[in-house]
Image: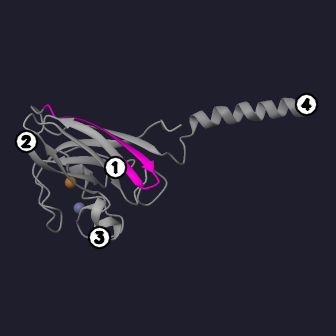
Amino acid sequence: MLMKKNAAAAASLFLCLSTLIPPAFADQAYARVNPTKEGSDLSGDFVFQETEQGLRLSGTVSGLTPGKHGFHVHEFGSCGDAGKEAGSHFNPHEAKHGYLPEDKLHAAHAGDFGNLEADSTGKASVDITLPGLKVSGNPFAVAGRALIIHEKEDDFSQPLGNAGSRVGCGLIVISKSTAS
Ligand SMILES: [Cu+2]
Ligand SMILES: [Zn+2]
C-alpha cells in the first residue's frame, strides 16, 4: 500500500515538474515578424517544423514593398535598434554567405534563406525546407534567434548579400508541436 502511494506521489511530482521545466527538445517553433520602424504595417507569421528532410519553414507576410527582400535567421534573439541587435547572419561554422536550400550547410550560412518576393500588393509567402537545421537541442537550432526581413534583395554577394536595412524582425520561439 505504501509503495503504491509513493509511486502515485512520484508520478504527480513528475507531472508537476514536467509542466515547469521547458522541454530539452522541441520540434516546432514560430516567429511573428513585426516592423522595425514606425509607420510600417509589415506583418508576418512563420512556422518552423522539423521533418525528415530538414526544417520546413512556411509562412506569409504583408506590408512589404513589391519585389525581393533578403530573408535570414540572424544570430541573436533581439530586435532592438531597428533589428541591428539581432547581430549577423546565423553562421555556427564559419561558412560563406549563400542560399541554404541549395548550397547546404557547408557552403552557406545556416541563416541564409534567400529572398521573399512580394507581389504588387506587398504580400509574400514561403514554403521551403532547410537542410540540416533544427528547432532546438543542436548547434544548428534556430529557436531563440531572430528572423529578419530586409529592405532590399539578397544578391548572394559576399559577405552578407547586400540586402540593406532590416525592415522586419521576429523572435523564433518554441511552440507546442502539432504533429500527431
Ligand atoms: Cu539578414
Ligand atoms: Zn548569410
Give how far apart the Cα atoms at labels 4 and 3 are. Answer: 61 Å
Whether label 4 lies within 8 Å of ligand 1 gets the answer: no
Q: In x, y percent, where is residue 51?
A: 45, 50
Residue 53 sits inside the magenta stretch: yes
- Please name the predominant secondary structure of the magenta segment in the image: strand
**Helix, strand or loop at mark 1:** loop
**Helix, strand or loop at mark 2:** loop
Asked which quadrant contains residue 1, the reply is: top right
Asked which quadrant contains residue 169, the reply is: top left
- Decide which of tag 1 and tag 4 comes sooner along the chain: 4
User: What's under tag 1, amino acid-wise?
Assistant: Arg
* Residue marked by disc 3: 107
Q: Which residue is drawn at 24% across and 58% down?
A: 88
* Residue marked by disc 1: 145
Residue 2 disc label: 4
- Decide which of tag 1 and tag 2 comes sooner along the chain: 2
Give how far apart the Cα atoms at labels 1 and 3 are. Answer: 21 Å
Q: In x, y percent, where is residue 35?
A: 17, 37
Mark 3 surroundings within 10 Å by alpha-carbon count, few (fewer than 14), some (14 through 19), many (20 or more): some
**How many numbered marks appear?**
4
- Decide which of tag 3 and tag 2 comes sooner along the chain: 2
**Residue nearest the viewer, comparing 6 with 44:** 44
From the viewer's perspective, is the residue at label 1 or at label 2 nearer?
2
* For residue 11, above or below residue 48: above
